[in-house]
Image (tube, helix red, strand yellow):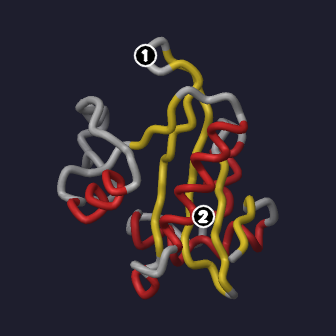
Amino acid sequence: MLIQIAETDEDISACFPVLRQLRPKLNESTFVADVRRMQQQGYVLASLRDGEVRAVAGYRYYELFATGNTLYIDDLVTDAAHRSSGYGEHLLKWLLAEAKRNGCNFLTLDSGNKRLGAHRFYRRHGLEDMALHFAIPTDGGPMWTSE
């Protein structure tokens, strides 16, 4: 298993099929440009490969009064055909090590209320419910791109 940061357009494109399983509204024709734009805002796209891409994480660093230096996971998904194979656990442990290596006080993420399997996975790996996340779309659109 190899975890690598997606730096080339080819690396970014290889993440699309897996990330789309979490974010079905992603557009393949704009995906690389979308990631490149988000990278300018601090987004990092990483993939776990075991031959092919098996799991993907998108994350960024920021600082808040509530949590201090924080690694925030935007996206974390394992290919549906390879779930329960240890890929998600391996990638989450890598993310936690990255947070520690970069002096973060917390690793955080949001998860849709209906993603109960994901919640069990996060709790099993030591993440705790800390707060409710409130939001309102400013354009009248859906709250999330995936439930």
The quadrant in which residue 24 appears is: bottom left
Residue placed most toward the observer, 12 or 65? 65
Q: Nearer the viewer, mark 2 or mark 1?
A: 1
Check the image and report above or below for 36 versus 32.
above
Amino acid at dot 1: Ala
Tag 1 residue? 66
Q: Position of residue 4 (x, y in %)?
A: 74, 64
Left or right of 78? Residue 97 is right
Secondary structure, mark 1, is: loop
Mark 2: give few (<14), some (14-19) or many (20+) Cα within 10 Å: some
Secondary structure, mark 2, is: helix
Left or right of 124? Residue 106 is right
Residue occupying image coordinates x 47% and y 72%: 78
Amino acid at dot 2: Phe
Q: Mark on residue 31?
A: 2
Q: Position of residue 2 (x, y in %)?
A: 72, 72
Left or right of 81? Residue 143 is left
**Quadrant containing the N terminus in the rendered view:** bottom right
CA–CA distance in space, label 2 to label 1: 32 Å
Q: Position of residue 135 (x, y in %)?
A: 27, 32
The quadrant in which residue 63 appears is: top right
Residue placed most toward the observer, 139 or 110? 110
Q: Mark on residue 95?
A: none
Residue occupying image coordinates x 47% and y 59%: 76
Check the image and report above or below for 99 versus 75.
above
Residue occupying image coordinates x 50% and y 46%: 73
